[in-house]
């Protein structure tokens, strides 16, 4: 038994054209689809950002969370829930010191990994300083880094420096 199109008439309705039709708002169907996709993408990114902050800064003040987001925007890329940095184009990824700390805490049985930044601006500053120190002082016996890895480390360090600068400003403002 075969299924074919023989004998099918009137498949396309009369007057069918394959041209983009304008809607009553003056936008084509493709424009509306692109707009809706962008809105959905923005919503997904917003939820992902919230999940990331909930996973590392559950008890951190809102101003610390905002400083994190601002630093992330300044330096490009995103940091995932597990501490993986991903470039804006999605072509590069790198495990951050933040992600390594989460892994190490879990390995040692500390299952409260959602509080890496602590509960204050001061505790967040301490955490970021530690991550910068760890970047600058790799463990003895660590393999040599390729040029690509060094570039990614520089991006991670730039993020931490930006975040730390914002946290210091918050700290200075709180002391006045």
Image (cartoon, rainbow, N blue to C red):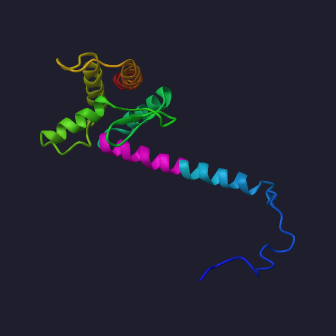
Q: Nearer the viewer, residue 84 or 46?
A: 84
Q: Nearer the viewer, residue 142 or 44?
A: 142
Which of the 4 image quarters holds residue 148?
top left
Relative image position of residue 20 (x, y in whole percent): 79, 57
Q: Nearer the viewer, residue 78 or 166?
A: 78
Quarter holding residue 114: top left
Q: Quadrant of the C terminus?
A: top left
**Residue 47, percent across and down?**
45, 50
Tell me if residue 86 comes above or below residue 54 in the rendering: above
Q: Residue furthest left?
A: 108
The residue that appears at 71% across and 76% down in the rendered structure is 5
Magenta span: chief secondary structure: helix
Q: Which quadrant is the N terminus positioned in?
A: bottom right
Asked which quadrant contains residue 168, the reply is: top left
Would you place residue 95 above or below residue 39 in this image? above
Residue at the image position 48 percent from the left and 37 percent from the top: 90
Instruction: Give the magenta-colored segment's residue range.
Output: 42-58
Report whether 97 appears left or right of 3: left
Q: Is residue 176 visible?
A: no
What is the x, y in percent for residue 32?
70, 55
Q: Is residue 93 left or right of residue 30?
A: left
**Residue farthest right in this picture:** 15
Residue at position x 39%, y 24% in the image: 152
Specify whether residue 37 is painted magenta: no
């Amino acid at each position: 038994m075969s299924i074919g199109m023989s004998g099918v008439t009137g498949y396309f309705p009369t007057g069918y054209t394959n041209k983009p039709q304008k809607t009553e708002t003056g936008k084509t169907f493709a424009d509306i689809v692109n707009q809706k996709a962008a809105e959905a993408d923005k919503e997904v990114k917003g939820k992902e950002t919230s999940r990331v902050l909930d996973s590392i800064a559950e008890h951190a003040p809102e101003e610390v969370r905002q400083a994190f987001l601002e630093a992330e925007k300044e330096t490009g890329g995103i940091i995932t829930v597990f501490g993986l940095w991903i470039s804006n184009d999605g072509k590069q990824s790198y495990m951050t010191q933040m992600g390594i700390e989460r892994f190490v805490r879990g390995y040692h049985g500390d299952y409260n990994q959602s509080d890496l930044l602590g509960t204050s601006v001061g505790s967040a500053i301490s955490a970021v300083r530690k991550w910068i120190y760890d970047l600058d002082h790799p463990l003895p016996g660590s393999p040599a880094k390729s040029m690509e890895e060094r570039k990614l480390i520089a991006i991670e360090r730039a993020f931490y420096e930006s975040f730390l600068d914002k946290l210091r400003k918050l700290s200075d403002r709180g002391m006045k």
